[in-house]
Amino acid sequence: MTSLPRTSLLRGPLAVVAIFVLALLVLYPGASLRGQSAPSAASRDTVTVPASPAARVDGEVSDMVVKGRSLEIRYRNTGTVATDILGELQVRDADGELVYAEAFVEGRRIGAGRGETFKVPMPALPAGSYRLYAVVDFGGSTLTAAEAALEIRP
């Protein structure tokens, strides 16, 4: 029996692998054998964050409804940030004179896009025509309010 040197046993499989790799390189144009360098320290430490929209402070008194002996005032934060609000119910007579005022909310934080309903007892008023105003300061450059007519008959 003839013994073959160990190097000749490995030569066949290595030749097959080499031919396979060369065939891949020739047949597949996108293939390449090139080294890749690691990203530089500057590019590794840079994180791109998409820009956020500017904070917008806004709100609205969306409704004011008499329910029995109370008044329901609905406020909604239409801005993009939470705000602390102050609200006051004002009652004015037919001449526009302030005859009643009461705070219905002070320093309540309302989240962006959220709303809340506040119940206020109806004030005891003599017979006459009145205008109700629910005024809310939401921290913006203006105030928001809802207005309603009220007629109290004798």
Image (cartoon, rainbow, N blue to C red):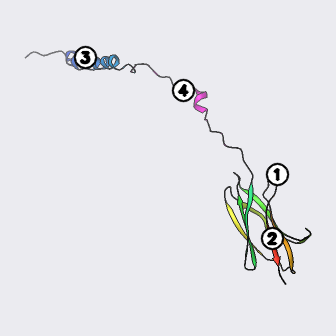
| Magenta: main secondary structure | loop
Instruction: Reply above or below: 126 against 55.
Output: below
Where is mark 1, residue-wise?
141
Instruction: Reply above or below: 111 against 154.
Output: above
First reached walking from the N terminus: tag 4 or tag 3: 3
Q: Which mark is residue 39?
A: 4
Instruction: Reply above or below: 128 against 41.
Output: below
* Residue extent of the magenta highlight: 31-53
Q: CA distance from mark 3 to mark 2?
A: 97 Å
Which one is nearer the viewer's eye here, 31 or 33?
31
Q: How many dots with numbers?
A: 4
Is residue 115 rendered to the left or right of residue 144? left
Q: CA distance from mark 4 to mark 3?
A: 35 Å
Is residue 143 rendered to the left or right of residue 15? right
Q: Which mark is residue 149?
A: 2
Q: Type of residue at label 2? A: Ala
